[in-house]
Image (tube, coloured by chain):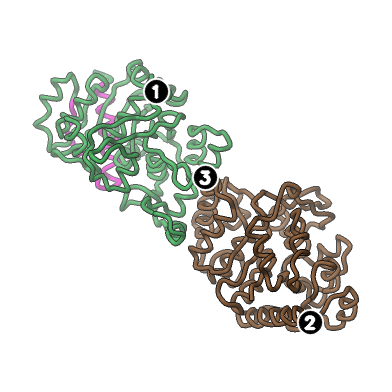
Chain colours: A brown, B green
Amino acid sequence: MKVCALAGGVGGAKLAAGLQDALVPGDLSVIVNTADDFDLWGLHICPDLDTVMYTLADIANPQTGWGVRDESFAALSMLDRYGEDTWFKLGDRDIATHILRTSKLRAGERLTEITAHLSSALGVQSRILPMCDEPVSTVVYTPDGPLEFQEYFVRRGQRDEVLGVKLRGIEDARPTKAVSNAIAKADAIVFCPSNPIVSISPILAVPGMREALAGSSAPKVAVSPIVGGRALKGPADRMLKSLGHEVSATGVAGIYRGVVDGMVIDRADEKERPEIENFGMNVLATDAVMRDGADRTRLGREVLEFCAALGAG
Amino acid sequence: MKVCALAGGVGGAKLAAGLQDALVPGDLSVIVNTADDFDLWGLHICPDLDTVMYTLADIANPQTGWGVRDESFAALSMLDRYGEDTWFKLGDRDIATHILRTSKLRAGERLTEITAHLSSALGVQSRILPMCDEPVSTVVYTPDGPLEFQEYFVRRGQRDEVLGVKLRGIEDARPTKAVSNAIAKADAIVFCPSNPIVSISPILAVPGMREALAGSSAPKVAVSPIVGGRALKGPADRMLKSLGHEVSATGVAGIYRGVVDGMVIDRADEKERPEIENFGMNVLATDAVMRDGADRTRLGREVLEFCAALGAG
């Protein structure tokens, strides 16, 4: 069963790991948001790609979900000593990733090739695919004005109210050949429980991406990142609210309406089932909170079974 | 007493530290060889500048003489995991230096400004001055063909016979304004015990450098890096031999003939005094081997006294 997942950072990476566990090695492709990529000290940093890569390579920091396990921060402490503003917590091993990626980008390699090289070196058998090779940047509009995404997300700790989101450069982006292939060959397409506004929507906004998804007859299932009216992680709940969406699994389903065939929601949100089914979607209510590796694998397996049932139905 | 030193890496940095100890803070300028600078993974690395900076900031690794004390190598181990050839031992703190320098160079800052910024942040009150802001690269000719300097020096462990040395880009280099000023204002000019072929000669080869030195009436003194017919560190002895120089303090004095007024040699080489004096140079024979911080300070003080005596004479 070939599966194509769409993912952002930590939450998406967790389900991707669960799907990877539940599948034959090599049968998972993960299309990853790159709209929160940015440059710092001349290094090109791809937070979501790296979170997915470290998680699938099983070297992610289990406490934070991002960064590398048992990481050290000696370079950052030196940058601090040089008077630099060290708001973005770059670990030493993580810096190696950025140095090598940046060096290969400057040499003319595409992000897709580079990501394949890095993840393969870390032993990842799943395909980790940037949503596009063109640079796209999420700009977050707040009462204090527009902010670069990492400025909003990390530096200012997601405390600003989000009034709007713009994807700079998106009009020139295209799904890569690897992305188009992964979608075309998938037996199931899974929208991971990532932030629908700033993680999954940028992927869907790549011109041609919605058409590619619509062109696939595989069942498409989204896992809600909102459980009991709150985001499992990050600012998705506040963002949904300030942008006029309902802060619920139903609110998420509304965003994916017409794109996915099924929603996976938490048992706590079972009462929302009729409303989501009214959108023409099937619903699986299960334990959608991934606390540990066993949770991920179980949820991955349940999502795949749900997809298989939808495909057969 | 304003002192201007010329230095390469480890040996030169040690005497520069001794001079710094012996002087009023801020009275030392060190003109540093940049012809062994190179790029690795897109990072611009200046080994001699960094060795001098770390040494004068008192954060150098006392075992190796280069790199930072209590350094870690997590980024390098990750680069190794990515399949990279990690022959150049970049430490995590050291990488921060290269990242920041490279980022500032790309933003259009000159190496001179950047070095001032970095060394000042590390609390160095002496001025550390790249010999020029233009890129110059030492190419070492060996029986196996031409080698980039760090290829010869680090990767191949200085085992190749050196048949010739070329300084690529030297014709377009000029002493910086800061270098010219340091020379013009110096009350004494000290050639540190660095490799005369690949550390000091590149500085002297910058078009206009010899004229600037000749234009100064300050006493000029060189400290021999050859003691008892052997280099204190590195391949200077074999290099002198294969390039047709005598492997002795006298051989070094021959290279600096017409440029310096005095040579500081080790007591072990006292017998060479008459020959060096025949070059029209004054000679100070002392303990020229710097084993520890006390040695550096003592030698620094003796060199300055020798300069003062020459200036008064």
Q: According to the image, label 1 marks what residue?
A: B171
Residue A198 seen anywhere in this rendered image of the structure: no
Look at 55% across and 38% down and name the residue there: B106
Between the residue at mark 1 and the residue at mark 2, the CA separation in whole angstroms equals 77 Å
Q: Nearer the viewer, residue A287 or B146?
A: B146
Say whether mark 1 and mark 3 are on the same chain.
Answer: no
Q: Position of residue B119 (x, y in %)?
A: 47, 40
Between the residue at mark 3 and the residue at mark 2, the CA separation in whole angstroms equals 49 Å
Q: Amino acid at mark 1?
A: Glu
Q: Is residue B38 above or below residue B206?
A: below
Q: Callout 2: few (<14), some (14-19), or many (20+) C-alpha neighbours within 10 Å?
A: few
Identify the mark at residue A313; answer none if there is no mark.
2
Q: Callout 1: few (<14), some (14-19), or many (20+) C-alpha neighbours within 10 Å?
A: few
Left or right: B97 in relation to B186: right
Q: Which residues are magenta?
A: B283-310
Identify the mark at residue A107; answer none if there is no mark.
3
Say which quarter of the image contains residue B19: top left
Left or right: B285 in relation to B180: left
Q: Amino acid at mark 2?
A: Gly
